[in-house]
Amino acid sequence: MTEPTWLSAARAKLGVRETPGPANNPTILGWAKTLGAKVLGIVFNADSVPWCGLFAAKCVAEAGLTPPPIAIRAKAWATWGKPLAASALAPGAVLVFERAGGGHVGFYVGEDDTAYRVLGGNQSDAVSITRIAKDRCIARRWPAGLPVIGKPVRLSASGAPLSRNEA
């Protein structure tokens, strides 16, 4: 089965990391420049600023979709597109999580009994796939007007660590 184009765009960015210290990763800053302050809701000029929303916006924009207003904010994604039931998730679904100090947004790639596997930006300062507790999820979304392609993907927890704060 073919995966959604925005998820393919996200996978292509796996491994992109923040630059430690006062320097910034030009790739991440380039994403912000391409999208612009009008889409993001802020002038983004440092990879030390939470950038999970920037990452999600870049991926959906590459797929020809429009990000939500103030896309830099993870919780802005909680009303984007259309809602999905937990039982109807498919790879590429947008998941929004609660976390200390704000929220987090990323793309569903699978799940085990207690956690989702999420491909997202700013997960331990990088684009990665991490395991996030299901009980922290506050929204599950899919692009409006597009049919959901796929179904939930069951994975084993197999000792994978559980993220408690993605920043």
Image (spheres, helix red, strand yellow):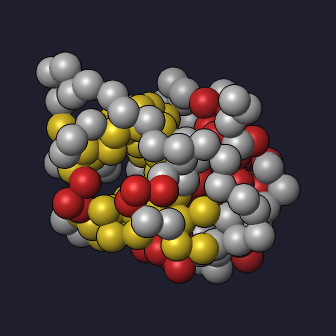
- When the figure is inspected, residue 142 is found, relative to residue 111, above or below; the finding is below
Q: Quadrant of residue 96?
A: bottom left
Residue in view at x 57 percent, y 36 percent: 25
Near-viewer residue (141 or 96): 141
In the image: residue 79, left or right of residue 161: right
- The correct choice, above or below, for 112 with respect to 69 in the image is above
Tell me where residue 158 sits by quadrant: top left
Residue at (79% x, 48% y) in the render: 62
Tell me if I can see residue 42 in this picture: no
Position in image of residue 106 (x %, y %): 47, 51
- 128 or 19: nearer the viewer: 128
Q: Residue at x 38, y 59 (%)?
A: 86
Q: Furthest-top residue in view?
A: 158
Tell me: residue 100, above or below residue 60: below
Q: Quadrant of the N terminus?
A: top right
Residue 111's spot in the image, x, y percent? 34, 39
Query: Where in the figure is residue 22, as x and y percent of width and height?
Result: 42, 42
